[in-house]
Image (tube, rainbow, N blue to C red):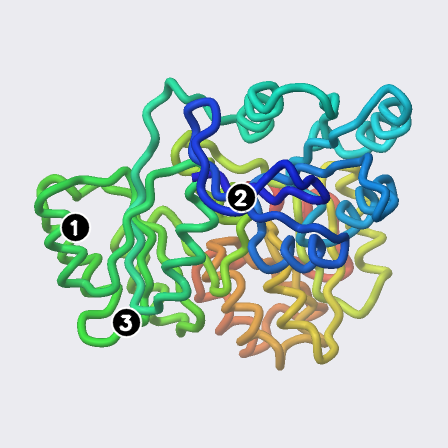
Amino acid sequence: MIHMLVIGDKRFHEGTHILTNAEYQTTVAGTAIKAFSDIIRIQPDIIILNMLNPAYDGLDVLQRIRNMRAGRDIPLIALVNDNNRAEVMDKALKTEGLTETVDYEEGIEVWTELCLELLHIDREAPRKRILVVDDDPIVLGTTELYLGAHYDVIVKSTAYDAVRFLNESKPDLIILDIAMPGTDGLTLAEKIRQMNECKELPILFQTGMASGNTIQKSMLLNPAGYMIKPMKKDVLLRKLQEIFKGEKKMFRKVLYVDDRVANLRTLKGILGEKYDFIEISLGSRMEEELQENDADAIIVNMDCAVQRMEAIRRKSLFSMIPVILVSKNLETKEIQKELKEPLTYALQEPFLKEEVIATFEAIR
């Protein structure tokens, strides 16, 4: 089911509709304020914005949606006429194919077909089936909401119900909560791996909090990856796409935890434009910033961040990304202890160009 938010168009009614052989759950916002709230609340798959409604400035609403964290990556169809088409298209050129225009007088079939194109949905292709197992009904509902446009989603709240389903049917992937009452996610995953039809079934673990020991145990079950609650829709969809396409994610984004900018300048000078460095402060928001940013590796200056390694390890283990420890002295007991952890590397200060390049090549 495709979740569509319609802004400022009285021709549409809330509810479930079948349009051009696709199922839509429609939410209608009569005002800009309600629209901004709905974008955050429901995170729609696509937005229809009536640019001709006199109750608001359509260009301003479009710009505000694109400035919102929750709205900047949602495909949007702007309903226009000849008077404002060029101006809207000028704005649309800055959103990398996420915004299209349709004449206001065109029939519903035209813009619903465009919806499917923007969402990259092929109605002729068989849809992947995803089993979501979690004891929290809110998580189940949210995950179904996030994935319904692209996948057939089956939800189960207990390990018992999940096993019963798997005995009768095989999905293409399982999203599995680790921390569940009774039979937890790791125990359930072990049972799933013992089922002949499910030995190679991709399992994507999700959890709000887990120790490094728990994650290391789960790695023995050959997971397809991990997601941290609360899940972000765009991150989840991107992860599923990577799994189903068998893609190896391009190594580019590096989180940089170090208060000394001189080191960052040196690394950029050595590595050039190959990597995007995201600076993470050591302040009170450090852990929040770590979780907010998707990345491919973490660089940590142990001379100033050694006390924050627990939070950094949570990020690296959940995301299955390497950590590069930086220090003037790599022989300290703290660093030697950390180097025993998986996916951990070290660089001595001052940096040597050959060592930096070799380390980054090793973790790609």
Please name whichever residue, 14 or 214, is drawn nearer the observer in this view of the structure. 14
Please name whichever residue, 158 or 321, is drawn nearer the observer in this view of the structure. 158
Residue drawn at x 75%, y 70% is 281
Q: Dot 3 corresponds to which residue?
A: 180
Q: Dot 2 corresponds to which residue?
A: 26
How far apart in space, not on screen, are marks 3 and 2 (Cα)?
33 Å
Label whose residue precedes the other's in the sequence (3 or 1): 3
- Give amino acid for label 3: Met
Q: Nearer the viewer, mark 3 or mark 1?
A: 3
Residue drawn at x 9%, y 42% is 196
Residue 250 lies left or right of residue 270; in this view the side is: left
Label whose residue precedes the other's in the sequence (3 or 2): 2
- Give amino acid for label 1: Arg
Callout 3 environment at 10 Å: few (<14), some (14 to 19), or many (20+)? Answer: some
Q: Is residue 200 above or below residue 162?
A: above
Q: Is residue 145 visible?
A: yes
The spot of residue 98 in percent (x, y) is: 69, 32
Q: Dot 1 corresponds to which residue?
A: 193
